[in-house]
Image (cartoon, rainbow, N blue to C red):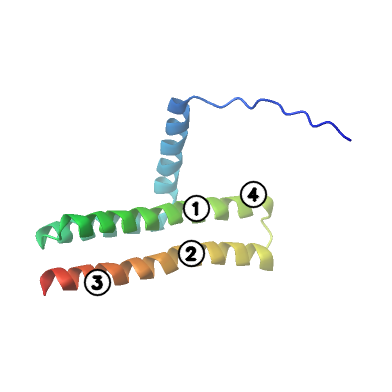
Amino acid sequence: MARVIIEKRRHKSLANSFRDAIFGFWLAFCQERNIHIQLFAAVVVIVFSLLIRIPLTELLIVFLLIGGVISLELINTSIERVVDLVTQERHPMAKAAKDTAAAAVWWFSVIAAVIYAIIVITTLF
């Protein structure tokens, strides 16, 4: 029976992990138009929600939805970058990977918009 040697993996410090994550967000912010659109929409939604006095529980749901959309956009961006790293050629599988990742953002955004509409309607009426 073969012996498995397990090497202890050295992790970077928590501070370095946070620094790298913030840099990743900043990089996406600087290079991706959709992040700008989503952050602008998030500010509009938050301001509007505060103006119509959405209850705290629903406001927390709104923040969760905003976080979900932006998180999925960051994952979509990373998938697109990895696909571009693997191949610069047009390939049906590369297109499918990119399109499917974009669809995840779109689908969550649609669901988030429906939930937000319900929250606004129930708050106003």
At label 4, the amino acid type is Leu
Q: Earlier in the sequence, mark 1 or mark 4?
A: 1
Question: Residue 97 appears at what percent x and percent y?
Answer: 60, 62
Q: Tell me the tag on residue 75.
A: 1
Report helix, strand or loop for mark 3. Answer: helix
Residue 96 in the figure: left or right of residue 5: left
Q: Earlier in the sequence, mark 3 or mark 1?
A: 1
Q: How many labels sit on residues?
A: 4
Q: Which residue is mark 4?
A: 85
Circle nearer the viewer, 3 or 1: 3
Q: Earlier in the sequence, mark 4 or mark 2?
A: 4
At label 2, the amino acid type is Ala
Cα–Cα span, label 1 and label 4: 15 Å
Q: Which residue shows up at 66% across the image and 25% down it?
A: 8
Q: Tell me the tag on residue 104.
A: 2
Cα–Cα span, label 3 and label 1: 25 Å
Q: Which residue is mark 3?
A: 117
At label 1, the amino acid type is Ile
